[in-house]
Amino acid sequence: MTHNHLENGKLPQGTESYWRANMTFPKFPSLEEDINVDVVIVGAGITGITSASLLAKEGLKVAVLEAGKVLNGTTGHTTAKITAQHDLIYDEFIHNIGRSNARLYYEANAEALHFMKETIEQHNIDCDFSIQDAYIYATTEKYARKIEKEAEAYEKLGINGGLVASIPFDIDIENALVMKDQAQFHPTKYLIHLIQDFKDKAGLIFEHTTAVNIETGEQPTVLTSKDHRVTAKHVLVCSHFPFYEGLGLYSTRLHADRSYALAVKTTKKFPGGIYISADEPTRSLRSVTVNGEELVLIVGESHKTGQGIETMEHYKALETFGEEVFGLDDIVYRWSAQDLVTLDKLPYIGELTSGQPNILLATGFRKWGMSNGTAAALLFRDMIVGKENTFQKLYSPSRFYAHPSLKNFLVENANVVGQLIKGKLDSPQRSPEDLANGEGAVITLEGHRKGAYKDDTGKLHIVDTTCTHIGCEVEWNNGDRTWDCPCHGSRFSFTGEVIEGPAEKPLQQYDYTMLDNLTSEDSGY
């Protein structure tokens, strides 16, 4: 395998996720007609595919709609840890939502891990699954105290783990907390098997099929961008950021975080286990094996999408960390991931609008979608077949725990408004002539704010910088060569095509306004 590396360093020039490299993915047609099914699922990541597989086993006719390609969103760009150790969270949950709810959150994720392990063993799925202890470590006194509090929370909740004094590589730590018997795997190998199983049960999957709206009622109908209709008894919205918001105001209750990943060959051997730092900037570590050769995944540098420093600096910071701790022989892959965070850090899983039991939603997994996404699929199955599920109330999107949620609601929306106004007042000084090959920037063209990217051949690609979701101004992401929205995390290619929602329409070549989307008939508003 050859890697085209950037000058003055080991970083590869292009981004590619290890989980998608050297894999053959099944291909599916786009939807070209109106259809009727029992359940329509929007989004073909871990939640959508696991839900489809479970519901087909119940004898239901299921269709999955995917705007791009299967397993190409957040699921294809994960760290792929299957764990209930989700940063420092249980002490916070005990204080904010109570001990019993904190315990339920742990149980939901532990049960998801158990379900995945059982599925892999029953079907002999070759997906590099292995049981690993999970560690969260502190390098400062401030976070060492927080880890002690988290250890007390583990004890209160009956979680198998506890404090340890050291971790087995060259990082000076104050203390660490282990959660025993967690796991890691190769997510796309696992999910390709579930897709095949779903197809064998007459399941339908349509790629390059963008859902844009839902007509509600006893038989809700999903409308696509090509004016096709999918009518069903139940709709599952598993599209990362919900493509349809109903009365749920999800744009005001979620924010998007971006993080970065390197897959590296190291001089020192990786000692096993999965690790995450409590301190900022986050450092997350695990190993993978490629053709008998071990690579280490180094992940971190989280920030709000479209906000923060030049994005290549994040990759360089991970490279420096890897060099210091392990010694780097080569950087084989680099990629970035996007995660959605709710107001109280608990995912929203359940009725999209309270009182509409036939339209269900799953979103806001933070960085822990492998276990939470599977827990969501198990909950969806139970809700659709009418079986009681212990976790339904915990995850309900209509919950409102006033202590953290109200404050965070105000903070998040002040941030969105701030970004909206900042973008509108921004007056770029650059012009297209200033750009070198391979460079992108916000420019002024004939008095208007535009986005320009000059590709490696010198061809100029110009787009309107107004995000087609609610009208914030996108910013150039040099590390991934994308236009990113700082308000709700929509991402676009340098030609303006949608890479990641909630935006459904490409960036325009003409001047675009906030009202264009809010007044559009095929908008999810």
Image (tube, rainbow, N blue to C red):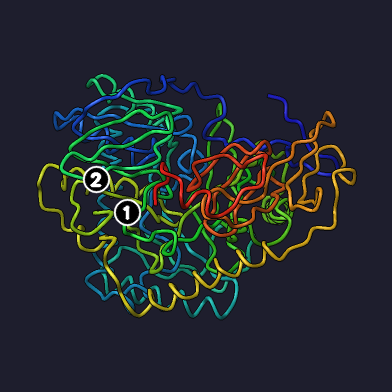
Q: In which quarter of the image is the N terminus?
A: top right
Q: Is mark 2 on a helix, strand or loop?
A: loop
Position of 319 compared to 337: left or right? Answer: right
Residue 146: where, in percent of width, then height?
47, 77
Whether residue 82 can be seen here = yes
Identify the amino acid type marked 2.
Thr
- Disc 1 residue crowd, few under 14, some 14–19, many 20+, Cα 10 Å: some
Distance of mark 2 from mark 1, alpha carbons? Answer: 9 Å
Residue drawn at point x = 63 percent, y = 45 percent = 262
In the picture of the structure, the residue carrying the numbered disc 1 is: 246
Residue 489: where, in percent of width, then height?
54, 53
In the picture of the structure, the residue carrying the numbered disc 2 is: 216
Whether 98 is drawn above or below 187: the answer is below
- Disc 2 residue crowd, few under 14, some 14–19, many 20+, Cα 10 Å: some
Residue drawn at point x = 81 percent, y = 48 percent = 445
Identify the amino acid type marked 1.
Gly
Residue contact at pointers 2 and 1, CB within 8 angstroms = yes
Position of 413 compared to 434: left or right? Answer: left
- Whichever of labels 2 and 1 marks the residue nearer the N terminus, that label is 2
Q: What element carries label 1?
A: loop
Q: Looking at the picture, tell me which residue is in the foreground, 279 or 181.
A: 279
Residue 253: where, in percent of width, then height?
41, 64
